[in-house]
Amino acid sequence: MDISFQTVEGRFNYRVAGLLIHDSKLLIMKDENQSYYYVPGGRVMLNETSERAVTREMEEELSIEVNVKRLLWVNENFFIESTSKEKFHEICFFYLVELQNEDLLTRGNEFTINENGKIHTYYWIALEELKDMSLYPLFLKERILDLPMSVNHIVETK
C-alpha cells in the first residue's frame, strides 16, 4: 500500500526520487498529459524504507537496477498540481543513484516507456539547461549544479 492519502484539505504523498546523472546530464521525465518535467521516482509503500523504494521505483519505471550512492535532500513541498488542481502536501527523499550497468544509455537521449497504460517520455538533459525548463520541484534547477555532501532539508510552498 502506497503512503498517500486524500483528505478534504488535499492529498498527502510520501515519495522518493532518483537522480541519475551521466556525462553531466540528468535523466528527467514527462507524462503525456503534463506540461512539466520531474525526476523518476514514486510513492513509498507502507513498511518499506525510502532507499528500497527508490531502487524499486527505478526498476518498475525503467527496468533498470541502480545503486544508491547517498541521500541528497529531504523536500517538504506544498503545491497545487497544475492538471488536477489538487492541493498536495508532499515529503520526498531525493537520492543520488548510479546505474549497475549501462544498458539504459543505449536507449538514446529521448525514449518513451508505456508503464501500465501511462506513457512516460524520458530525456537526458544537460545540467546547465535545466534552469530554463519547467522542472519540479523548483529547487532542483539550481541545486543540481552543486550536490550536497550531507543531507539538506528544503521546504517549498507554492
Image (cartoon, helix red, strand yellow):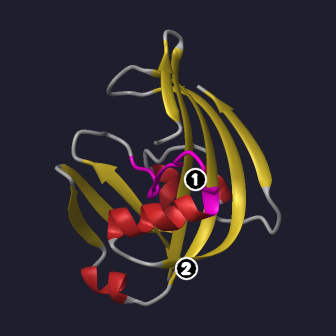
The residue where tag 2 is placed is 98
Whether 39 is drawn above or below 156: the answer is: below
- How many numbered marks, from 0 up? 2
Q: Distance between the residues labelled 2 and 1?
A: 20 Å
In the rendered view, does 7 fall on the left or right side of 116?
Answer: right
Does residue 15 appear to the left or right of 146 in the view shown? left
**Is residue 117 within the magenta segment?**
no
Please report contact status of discs 2 and 1: CB closer than 8 Å, yes or no: no
> What residue span does the magenta drawing correspond to?
37-51
- Say above or below: 112 vs 74: below
Residue 45 x %, y %: 52, 48
Asked whether residue 1 appears in the rendered view, the answer is yes
Instruction: Name the residue that disc number 1 marks.
Output: 141
Q: Residues within 10 Å of mark 1 (few under 14, many from 20)?
A: some
Return the x and y of residue 138 as percentages of the image width and height.
Answer: 57, 43
What main secondary structure does the magenta stretch of the protein show? Answer: loop
